[in-house]
Image: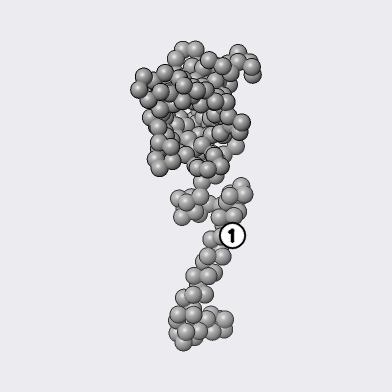
Amino acid sequence: MELAKRIGEFARKQPKDFAILIMLLFFILTTILFWLKLNGQKIQLPFLENYVRVVPEGLPNTVTTDILNKYSKIVGNYKYRCKSKPKNHGGVLHIEIITTDNGLQWKLTGERRWEEIKDTLNGTIIKKTFLDIPYQWETTWGDFITDNKIAYRYEISRTDKHIKGYAEGLVDPSGNISCNYWQLPPDDPLYGSYEFKRVADKNDTEW
């Protein structure tokens, strides 16, 4: 009781300092709760559930055999090529399944290994260059938007620029994928078509 009385007197005499103290304590408490939640502790607070989502381990209970089979059919190693008006490029990539708190998604990690420069007038290939340092790229989100159509966002890491893009694709019965992509401005904007073709082995990289 004495402590509560003193706190009350402090709040009346120095309301601004009291408000700052309360905000500081709230910040410290919230930080601790966030840390516990992100490290796997079962913290059940309504406001915390709205802002902190932790990817669960294992497959969600809602995943059926049909859904698992749909995602599994695109898992594997591919070679790819992208075609656009100013140039073509391509390389290799790998697709895997990942689990999220919203269900299954898939993730792509790729490597651009070559680029072809085209004649701007007739579209013929002038020069093909194999990159000494391949560009690494990966999806930041990838999912099925229909039973045989995928969509994904991706990022390309380069020393001189950071490129983001979006693509959609149709999955054929053999698991190959093709459709259109858009590299977004301001860095190296491109629009074109692409193909993912399954590879026989690690040496199967050329078209």
Answer yes or no: is residue 20 visible: yes
Which SS class for mark 1?
Answer: helix
Residue 192 visible in the current orientation: no
Name the residue furthest left: 121
Colour pattern of the rendering: one colour
150 or 191, nearer to the observer? 191
The structure residue drawn at horizontal position 49% and vertical position 78%, both measured from the top left corner, is 18
Is residue 125 shown left or right of residue 202? left
Q: Looking at the figure, which quarter contains the N terminus?
A: bottom right
Q: Which residue lies at the image location 45% right of the left edge and 20% below the top edge?
A: 125
Residue 156 x, y percent position in the rendering: 51, 37
- Closer to the camera in the image, 142 or 50: 142
Residue 42: image x %, image y %? Answer: 58, 49
Q: How many marks?
A: 1
Depth check: 41 or 191 in front?
A: 191
Residue 64 against residue 53 in the figure, above or below: above
Residue in view at x 58 percent, y 29 percent: 131
- How packed mark 1 is, by other alpha carbons closer than 10 Å (few <14, some 14-19, many 20 or more), is few
Residue 17: percent from left, percent from top:
49, 80
Q: Give the labeled residue for mark 1.
A: 32
Quarter of the rendering containing residue 186: top left
Picture coordinates of residue 28 (x, y %)?
Answer: 56, 65
| Residue type indicated by callout 1 | Ile
- Rendered view: 143 above or below 125: below
Residue occupying the point 39% across, 20% down:
123
Q: Nearer the viewer, residue 167 or 184?
A: 184
